[in-house]
Image (cartoon, rainbow, N blue to C red):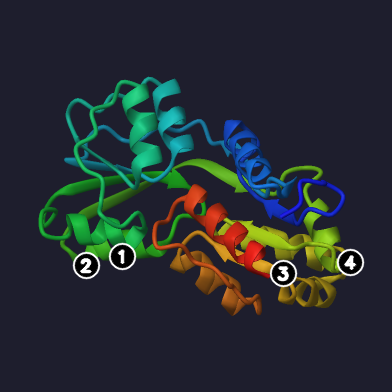
Amino acid sequence: MTSDTESAPKVAVFRPDDERIEDAVELLEEHDVEPVPDPMLAVEPTGTEPRSDGAVTVLTSKTGVELAAEAGWESKDTQFVAIGPATADAAEAAGFDVDLVPEVYTSAGLVNALEDSVDGERVEVARSDHGSPTLIQGLTDAGAYVHETVLYELVIPDGAGESVALAADGALDGALFTSSLTVKHFLSIAADRDVEAAVRDGLESAVVGAIGSPTAETAAAAGVTVSIVPESADFAALARAVVGELESH
């Protein structure tokens, strides 16, 4: 693959606008890809914090951990459950003791990890306003008394949409969708610009990756064909798989 950025494949990445987008850009550049950093999610904190009366407390993102820590919340009297390694790493950096990380880093994975131990227990779920209903319903079905705290809302950032314009022009070679909401916000921008059909056509000729099955299902339901779903729900694995597919073309 050429290192000439004028002819290198353009790959859109939708990580949050912090060190995660910086790391993603660096990773793609190492593979001679021209990154198109286009954050699709902006965080608006609600000013709340997790309740302290849960026998089990579940956090589902690095952002949620950071907001809980900033609010002065403590984990010492609860079983702290993190949805995946990135959330667990953030929790440990904040001084929280992580008791459990599921084998599968999804809402369904959390339910599978907890369903045999939460019957009759209070479970606090602290996350964004776009959390999957699978988690709440699954824990409720397992007999838990579930309370959900919305720590932050996820909105479309001002200025987002460079990748949408490229897709509409047929100039986007790859896209790395990292959550169902990145898919929805991407297509919402396309709808606002009245270029939905052109964007879907443009993505048909691109290598579209989704970080996991829920994201892939959201894309498919919206008429977007996903080419790549890595075995591990991990951004680096997603990026490598999409780049590998581009290299094989």
Report, in whole angstroms, how far the alpha carbon at label 4 lies from the one at label 2.
Answer: 47 Å
Nearer the observer, 106 or 207: 207
| 187 up-or-down from 53: above or below | below
Is the Cβ of the residue at disc 2 closer than 8 Å to that at disc 1? yes
Disc number for residue 206: 3
Please identify the residue farthest to the front as the structure is shown: 2
Q: Which residue is mark 4?
A: 169
Report, in whole angstroms, how far the alpha carbon at label 3 lies from the one at label 2.
Answer: 40 Å
Query: Which of label 3 and label 4 is nearer to you?
Result: 3
| 96 up-or-down from 121: above or below | above
Disc number for residue 87: none
Query: Which of label 1 and label 3 is nearer to you?
Result: 3
Kind of residue at disc 2: Asp
Report, in whole angstroms, how far the alpha carbon at label 3 lies from the one at label 4.
Answer: 12 Å
Residue 242 is situated, as x and y percent measured from the top left of the image, at 59, 61
Report, in whole angstroms, how far the alpha carbon at label 4 lies from the one at label 1.
Answer: 41 Å
Kind of residue at disc 3: Ala
Q: Quadrant of the C terminus?
A: bottom right
Q: Which residue is mark 2?
A: 141
Q: Secondary structure at mark 4?
A: loop
Q: Quadrant of residue 49?
A: top left
Q: Secondary structure at mark 3?
A: loop
